[in-house]
Image (cartoon, grey):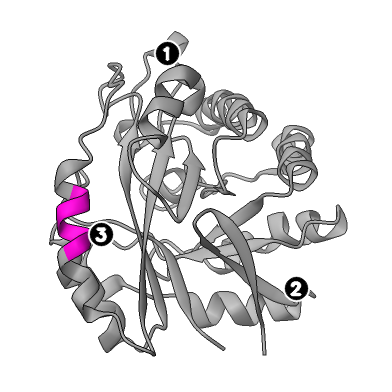
Amino acid sequence: MLLCDCHTHSICSPDGNVPILEMARAAKAAGLGELCITDHCDLLNGGGERTLSYDWAPVLEQYAQARQLEDESFALRLGLELGGAQVSPAHAEAILAGAELDFVIGSVHNKSEALGGGDFYYVSYTSPRLCHELLDDYFDSLLAVARLGLYDSLGHLIYPLRYMNRRDGQGVTLEPHLPVIREILAAVIESGRSLEVNTYCGRTVEDWREVLVLYHEMGGRRVTLGSDAHHPENVGRGMAEACALLRELGFGEVTVYRRRQPRGIPLN
């Protein structure tokens, strides 16, 4: 099958490291057939302040340069990771109108403004109780994003767990949050959109099992794959393992987007 990485970041993201061209070269070297650049556009910055505009110029310039690498075996797509669209839907729509995109990831990286708005990355997770309080807040925001619908694939649903479980050793379970997770998945399915399996550069493939089982039981079939790579060496990491997990759980295809229209690629 055509392996595709639909969630990557370049130097056009605040936490990116290399130009789009370098990420594209890495994708070709890794044997990927398709790469989508989805640089960050968060309506709240890391400290929780509103950032309601986006400069498309450097992204479009770098994307145009990197397309020189395209050939019959490799395609480069232009996307965006739109974080926190529920903060200001009108500004989110205006940002999306600034470029002709193939793909939009809808995600949440920040606490709600009521809790200060800072990125979950910067939180010190000192107790399981705090973790679950923040997961309540996170899933409420993600449900708002899922229902708003300004996305093609709902990004890294288990995002805070990568910090709660690995940095501070909390071992947090999703069990108390399954009712709202069901609501989120229902919104994705009913809208005909996709759920992203984000491998976190190959670190979290197995962590998706519980959510994917539930998603499949509820009738969800559209899934996109993304490594969340911020460095060239991580492009495509976890894609093959994620495909194996999806096949095991009964999924028949993965989804890619072109001009924001879904296209299924068989898992064979």
Q: Secondary structure at mark 3?
A: loop
Q: Secondary structure at mark 2?
A: loop
Specify the amino acid type for callout 2. Answer: Phe
Q: 79 left or right of 204?
A: left
Q: Which of the two labelled residues, at mark 1 and mark 2, occupies the earlier sequence position?
A: 1
Specify whether residue 63 is painted magenta.
yes
Quarter of the image where the C terminus is located: bottom right
The residue lying toward the viewer, choosing from 231 and 136, is 231
As displayed, is residue 104 above or below residue 130?
A: below
**Quadrant hosting residue 73:** bottom left
| Secondary structure mainly formed by the magenta segment | helix
Residue extent of the magenta highlight: 59-64
Q: Which of the two labelled residues, at mark 1 and mark 3, occupies the earlier sequence position?
A: 1
How far apart are labels 1 and 3 at the CA level?
A: 26 Å
Q: 79 left or right of 221?
A: left
- x%, y% of residue 185? 73, 44
Q: Residues within 10 Å of mark 3 (few under 14, many from 20)?
A: many
Specify whether residue 149 is painted magenta.
no
How far apart are labels 3 and 2 at the CA level?
A: 28 Å
Residue 251 is tagged as: 2
Instruction: Please give the residue where the numbered disc 3 appears in the rendered image.
Output: 230
Instruction: Please give the residue where the numbered disc 1 appears in the rendered image.
Output: 113
As displayed, is residue 71 above or below residue 78?
A: below
Specify the amino acid type for callout 1. Answer: Glu
Q: Which of the two labelled residues, at mark 3 and mark 2, occupies the earlier sequence position?
A: 3
